[in-house]
Amino acid sequence: MLLYFAAKRYAVLTLASTLCYNFPPMSHYAETTVRVRYAETDQMGVVYHGNYFTWFEVGRVELCRQLGFEYKRMEMEDDSFIVVADAHCRYKRPARFDDLLVVRTKVAEAQRRTVRFDYEILNQASGELIAIGDTLHVFCDRAGKPKSLPEKYRKYFPITKDNNSD
């Protein structure tokens, strides 16, 4: 039964990878690499779909570093957490055990209390687009109460929409 579901998932991934999508290349992004571990794959050696969201997180944290601040310090020193409110991933081609993947992350949109990140995951060896996605986050305090982004971080997340829209 497990093999049936793995084969069915593989067929869906293969079908999705053959469809033609025209997405413009991402600009103004941070880049980091991850190697697919054996534990991140199913019986057929294909990456389990939930792992892409972990790699999105790796990309977000690295984006913060490349922008000039540590997300960990933002939490500890400023009681500001970037809480996931919505997440999407579109799988283009399967990633497999030991593939080296490039995770590209950028701030797509920012408001007073929210930020949206866009992601691309590419196979480093072939350059093929493996997946694209986005996540919407709410700035919150430790108790989970939404709050405005502290002033000192606004240069990293410039407002891209009207303040009244969030």
Image (spheres, grey):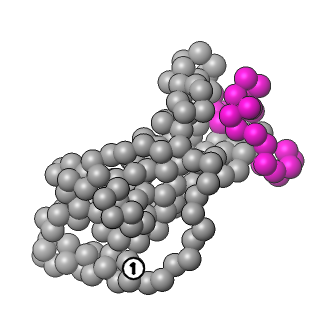
- The residue positioned farthest toward the top in the image shown: 77
User: Which image quadrant is residue 78 in?
Assistant: top right
| Left or right placement of residue 157 versus residue 84 in this view | right
* Label 1 environment density (alpha carbons within 10 Å; few <14, some 14–19, many ≥20): some
Kindly identify the residue that appears in the image at 38 percent across and 83 percent down: 18
Near-viewer residue (145 or 150): 150
Q: Position of residue 96 (x, y in %)?
A: 23, 61
Which amino acid lies under the numbered mark 1 shown in the image of this protein?
Ala
Q: Does the magenta stretch include residue 156?
A: yes
Place residue 152 in its image quadrant.
Answer: top right
Q: Eyeballing the image, is 75 above or below 15?
A: above
- Dot 1 lies on which element? helix
- Residue at the image position 35 percent from the left and 56 percent from the top: 124
Q: Can residue 101 be seen in this view?
A: yes
Is residue 136 visible to us here?
no
Q: Residue at x 81, y 50 (%)?
A: 161
Front in this rendered view, residue 133 or 101: 101
Task: Measuring from the top left, give residue 9's x and y in whole percent.
Answer: 27, 75
What secondary structure is the stretch in magenta mostly built from?
Answer: loop
Horizontal and vertical percent for residue 104?
A: 49, 50
Q: Which image quarter is the N terminus in?
A: bottom left
Residue 59 counted in the magenta span: no
Residue 73 horizontal side relative to residue 95, left or right: right
**Side of 121 relative to 10 (left or right):** right
Specify start and end residues of the magenta stretch as a single range.
139-166
Q: Identify residue for label 1.
A: 16
- Could you tell me which residue is drawn at 57 percent across and 63 percent down? 25
